[in-house]
Image (spheres, grey):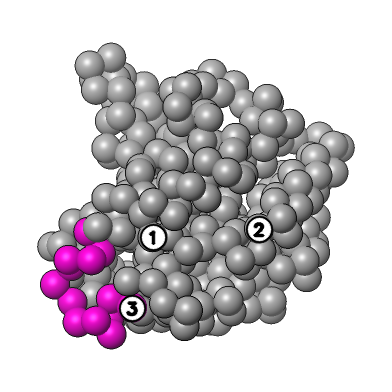
Amino acid sequence: MSTKTNPVIAIEEHYWDAELSALFMGVESTRDAEIMRRLTDLGELRIKEMDEAGVDVQVISHGAPSAQKLTGPDAVALTRRVNDRLHAATLAHPARFAAFAALPTDNPQAAADELERTVQLGFKGAMLHGLANGVFLDDKRFRPIFARAEALDVPIYLHPALPMQAVTDAYYADYIKDFPMVVRPAWGFTVETATVAIRLILSGLFAEHPKLKIVLGHLGETLPFLLWRIDQALKRPGAKAMSFRDVFTSNFYVTTSGFFSDPALLCCVMEMGVDRILFAVDWPFVANKPATEWMGRVPLCAEDRAKILGGNAKKLLKM
């Protein structure tokens, strides 16, 4: 699948920085031992598993909650150190690694400045994880981040994080013991991230910043499947005039991270067009091989498959 002119580029691939992850608390602070071994590797093991699956490039990003629960005077400096260490890893393997920045959202203006600093270093954009210290990202205080992303012409990747504890208690507590992933990728992550995306659209963010680019993983967190109904329902009498569909299909991209389903992919192609879909694995939470093997047999023509595997990422991320 990979060629010199069309490398396979995976764009939702995670790691943990030792200084930052040491501050994570509760269930966010622990992972399976094999997952941890991979999260903390930025060299031999990561590249070995890329090679085994035919992944040429990973765009690496910090795992949730990244820097979004940091507060206090050291938040900006700590995030800068985190990004500098990731930058060093990309310099050590420039043909194999690129990066999305972590941002200190507790200080939105400083976060915008950190986005610009990292883009100047060669970062491809930034990744944000769910709410920022319990505040939705459509809050006006975060506008400087999105304004700067638009000005720099780089995307913001919206990645899941755990729901707030009140939501977890009300919606999932009855089933977490028997089905611990129900609050994570099985459902909770999807609901949280789709809600963040919907609120960004309803807030008027894209009217203010019409060239802003947002990426959603997991084939759009169900939104491509629901697009017709959301758009139609929002246009019923009594609503403020807007086209949800137009904003979503003009400003959003989706990736295949952790979602290797032909029907789901074809839904995204039909709703958004193949140019809006990018390849991702969600490594190390999902193994590389199932992703590339699936892409090798998806019912798309070779040209469209090549766009998803790397061509679209090369264009969006200027690689």
User: Earlier along the polypeptide chain: callout 1 or callout 3?
Assistant: 1
Range shown magenta: 294-306
Is residue 295 one of those drawn in magenta? yes
* Quarter of image, res 8: bottom left
User: Which element type, helix, strand or loop, lies under badge 1?
Assistant: loop
Could you say which is closer to the camera, residue 106 or residue 121? 121
Q: Which residue is mark 1?
A: 54
* Quarter of image, res 269: bottom left
Q: Are marks 2 and 3 in contact (CB under 8 Å)?
A: no
Which quadrant is the C terminus positioned in? bottom right
Marks counted in the figure total 3
Is residue 29 one of those drawn in magenta? no
Q: Label 1 sits on what residue type? A: Gly
Q: Are marks 1 and 3 in contact (CB under 8 Å)?
A: no
Q: Which residue is mark 2?
A: 93
Image location (x, y in percent) of residue 26? 54, 18
- Horizontal arrangement in the rendering, residue 63 relative to residue 153 (left or right): left
Residue located 30% across and 55% down the image: 291
User: Which element type, helix, strand or loop, lies under badge 2?
Assistant: loop
Q: Which residue is mark 3?
A: 306
Q: Is residue 76 above or below residue 117?
A: above
